[in-house]
Amino acid sequence: VKRIELPKSIRILHRDYLVQYFPEDGDHGCDGICEFRIGRISIVTTLSNDLIFETLIHEIGHAVNYAADIDDPSTEEEQVHRTTPIWMQVWRDNPELLNLLQRYCEGKL
Ligand SMILES: [Zn+2]
C-alpha cells in the first residue's frame, strides 16, 4: 500500500506537532487524533489518500482552535468538521492560490 508521505512535524504557532500514522482502531470510529498536550497528530493508516489528507487538515484545525483557545467541545468539533472539507476544496481547486501562498512563505513575493 502506497500512502501519502506526511510531513514529520507541523508547526502551529510555537508548537511542533509530530505527525504519525496509527493502525485502525476497530469500532472506535476515529480517523485521526490531535493530542495537544504532547504535541502529536495521528492518522489511521487504512484511509484513502483523500481521507488521509482531509483528516490531517481536520486535526490541524483542532490544533489551530487550541492555539486560539477555542475549546467548547461541541461547537469546536462542529466548526472543524464543517470547515475542513471546504478548505480541502479551496486548496484543491485553486493551485494558483497555493502557489502564491508558497511564494509568500518562501519570501519570494
Ligand atoms: Zn475532530
Image: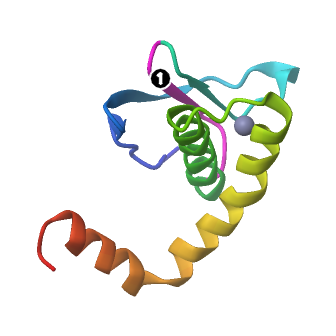
**Left or right of 17, for residue 74:** right
Instruction: Give the residue displayed 31% in from the left and 78% down from the top.
Output: 99
State which image quarter holds ligand 1. top right
Q: Which colour scheme is used?
A: rainbow
Could you tell me which residue is drawn at 66 percent across and 52 percent down?
Answer: 51
Q: Residue 26 in the image: state x and y as whole percent.
A: 81, 20
Q: Residues within 10 Å of mark 1 (few under 14, many from 20)?
A: some
Of the residues shown, which amino acid type is indicated by label 1? Arg
The image quadrant of residue 14 is top left
Position of residue 71 relative to residue 103, above or below, is: above
Which residue ends up furthest to the front in the rendered image? 69
- Would residue 90 appear left or right of 84 to someone viewing this image? left
**Region rendered in magenta:** 38-48
Residue 8 position (above or below residue 4):
above
Tell me the quarter of the image containing the C terminus. bottom left
SS for dot 1: strand
In percent of the image, x 51 and y 72: which residue is there? 91
Q: Quadrant of residue 90?
A: bottom right
Given residues 100 and 22, the one toward you in this image is 100
Q: Where residue 67 appears, x then y in whole percent? A: 50, 34
Q: Is mark 1 within 8 Å of ligand 1?
A: no
Position of residue 94 measured from the top left corner of the image (x, y, whole percent): 49, 83
Return the residue at label 1: 40
The residue drawn where x is 40% and y is 28% is 17
**Residue 108 shown left or right of residue 27 in the figure:** left
Outermost residue on the top side: it is: 38
Q: Residue furthest left?
A: 108
